[in-house]
Amino acid sequence: MKKFLMAGLAGTVAGVIATTQIAGPLLAQEADSKATVYEQLDLFGDIFERIRAQYVEEVEPEELIEAAIDGMLTSLDPHSSYLSPDDAEQMRVQTRGEFGGLGIEVTQEEGFVKVVSPIDGTPADEAGIEAGDFITHVDGESILGLTLDKAVDLMRGPVGSEIVITVVREGEQEPFDVTIIRDTIKLTAVRARTEGTSVVLRVTTFNDQTFPNLQEGLNEQIEEAGGIDKVNGVVLDLRNNPGGLLTQAIKVSDAFLNEGEIVSTRGRDANDGERFNATPGDLAEGKPIVVLINGGSASASEIVAGALQDHRRAIVVGTKSFGKGSVQTVMPLRGDGAMRLTTSRYYTPSGRSIQALGVSPDIIVEQPRPAPETDEDEADARTRSEADLRGSLNNDSLSEDEIRQIEEDRAKAEATAELREEDYQLAYAIDILKGLSAFNPTGGPSQ
């Protein structure tokens, strides 16, 4: 205790001496800085008044000020912005899980509007919009050079109305138009189902309902399977999940971790950093976990994938994630508006920032595009076996129960094969769980 106090005292004394020696120059610099700021504010006032008085058309002063504020924020990074009272209310509604629109999460990249991901089951998803698409026009009007908020405003409209967006996609030679009917977007945060003996948790967003939905869905699937011993593992599907609430990402990570750090945040001031740690309890009771990610997995999705990967609690499969490693704080402003400001970066338990880098999968698995069926495929589907031949011998070495078990196993394998055609990445994840289960039949974590 004495050493601590002495170290503090020495620091204080040194600080007093240093201040005494350079107080004059510091005060002069501070005065110069303030003078410069006041000069710039005077310049802003001059420009504001000239626009009001001399612009070719009359403009509302409030709109000018809002545009100036928004320009100041959007110049910082793609995620900081001003929210008008209407935008702020819409954001609050969205975090509750229901809103009107197309169903896409977008960002801005070098002046272009880029799709982070379509949301499952929304008009954009059903119209074929993909993560990584660039939107260049809305109803024939170019959005190049617009702020992200202005571009989003053009895409909003009444439920049931039609919108035509022009898309540039990697691998396509020409831009193409996509017609979408706006609808009310009702987000189901988590969809749970069982494939064979693997529980699949499809997490589409991180809103207020994510953790409760995940917990309820997982428990229901385990109960329907006949208990945790009948389950060989969990697939946590975070593909095309654009993120959402940091608090929910922490809860989802904590659901499968017994201890250790989940994520840390660090702002400009080192003292403002926070660390979030797991609490005892694992909903999967040590069963293997595979996390699926792709280029549409961003922000909160990357927190979960990074935490489970660093703790070696899950195998991460798919393709590199989006790489949004910053945290935005929404600050209420007078007049019911709000300011969304990037206030910190987040770091995975191992101390790595995924900003602009993303989470790299342990196993890279691309999702192949569906190929058209050929005559050879149809011929392969009609391949005959010994059992199809007239008068073939029966297998008399197996009991009826053994034959029934073989047929059940074959049916499961065929179901997996069908799933592989429909969703190769998910089938790959389930195959990993099968392999881990065969290698470690007890289902607990292998050492």
Image (cartoon, rainbow, N blue to C red):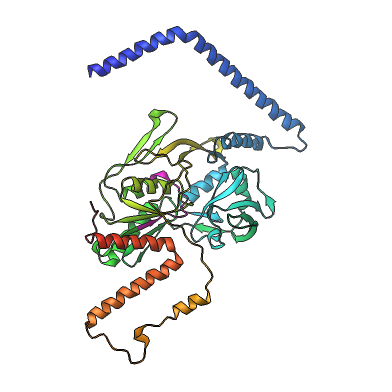
Residue 162 visible in the snapshot: no
Quadrant in which residue 389 is drawn: bottom left
Give how far across and how far down residue 73 sits, in percent.
56, 35
> Which residue corresponds to the image point at 21% horizontal and 82% vertical from the top-left?
399
Q: Nearer the viewer, residue 423 or 34?
A: 423
Q: Is residue 242 magenta?
A: yes
Instruction: Give the left or right position of residue 29, taking residue 359 as reference.
Output: right
> Which residue corresponds to the image point at 44% horizontal and 81% vertical from the top-left?
382
Give how far across and how far down residue 142 sits, in percent.
68, 49
Residue 150 drawn above or below residue 370: above
Name the dominant secondary structure of the magenta segment.
Answer: loop
Q: Nearer the viewer, residue 258 or 369?
A: 369
Residue 348 visible in the snapshot: yes
Q: Nearer the viewer, residue 35 or 347?
A: 347
- State the extent of the magenta-drawn residues as a range: 235-247
Give how far across and how far down residue 52 sits, in percent.
72, 32
Instruction: Give the left or right position of residue 87, taking residue 290 as reference.
Output: right
- Quarter of the image that includes the N terminus: top left
> Which residue corresponds to the image point at 23% horizontal and 62% vertical from the top-left?
441
Instruction: Give the left or right position of residue 80, taking residue 306 as reference.
Output: right
Give how far across and how far down residue 158 sits, in percent.
61, 56
